[in-house]
Amino acid sequence: MTPDDKLTAARESFSGKTMTDSQLREAVAIADILHVEIHRSGTFIEKLTDYAHAFARNERFDAMRAEKVLRDTYTAVQGQSMNQTREGLQANEERLPEAAHARALACAETIGELIQAPPTQPFYQAYDRAAVTLATELQITQSGAKTLMKDAYSQAHNRDLYEHGKQIEDTYHKPVREAEIAQRKADRLQSQSLTQRRV
């Protein structure tokens, strides 16, 4: 759904009919954030509460009304409620196909390659990228994908995925990162030195 389609769908919702254009755009943006959170963690209540308070802060409605608006907007944009999205992902995690374990192992094994490939990246970013890939393929949460990868890797290699990834990070990413930091410091010192000479 394009951004314009989202705005049109939100405008046609019960709450959307009474919102200003800027309120509608903000509600759609928050609905997108909530969608990402459900796919990441499988939960939304805390983030919904936080955003409802923030949304209502400068409006003529309270946080309870803001939450209702955000729920309506989410349903209009996604075609289902936040809870239905959460339950769907949860149901998929409970009925994983037989190939899920092998796919989780394959994704876990790409983490080392992701850390090493230029430009290098830290373990947490590579782990997250692999989790997003697996979660998208299996239609589960990223949190569930991480657990699945961790378990599959441990069973296959009798080794903790986190420890293995951190070792690769220390070998490949950390020296590159430290060199970048040192270069930035040297550039900053040179720039300060030139500035002081001009003064």
Image (cartoon, rainbow, N blue to C red):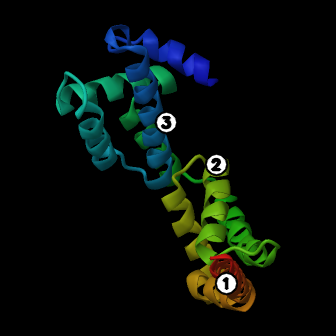
**Element at label 3:** helix
**Pointer 3 with pointer 2, Cβ within 8 A:** no
From this viewpoint, is residue 25 visible? Answer: yes
Q: Which residue is mark 1?
A: 193
Q: Which of the two labelled residues, at mark 2 and mark 1, occupies the earlier sequence position?
A: 2
Type of amino acid under label 1: Ser
Residue 176, quarter of the rendered image: bottom right
Percent position of residue 164, x then y: 64, 87
Percent position of residue 159, x then y: 61, 89
Distance, label 3 to label 2, CA atoms, is 16 Å
Distance, label 1 to label 3, CA atoms, is 47 Å
Q: Which of the two labelled residues, at mark 3 and mark 2, occupies the earlier sequence position?
A: 3
Mark 3 Cα-neighbour bin, 10 Å: few <14, some 14–19, many ≥20 = some
Q: Which residue is mark 2?
A: 136
**Pointer 2 with pointer 1, Cβ within 8 A:** no
Q: Which residue is mark 3?
A: 32
Q: Nearer the viewer, residue 180 or 128?
A: 180
Mark 1 Cα-neighbour bin, 10 Å: few <14, some 14–19, many ≥20 = few
Screen quadrant of the N terminus? top right
**Element at label 2:** helix
Q: Is residue 60 above or below residue 151?
A: above
Type of amino acid under label 2: Thr
Instruction: Point out which mark residue 81 bears.
Output: none
Percent position of residue 39, x then y: 50, 47
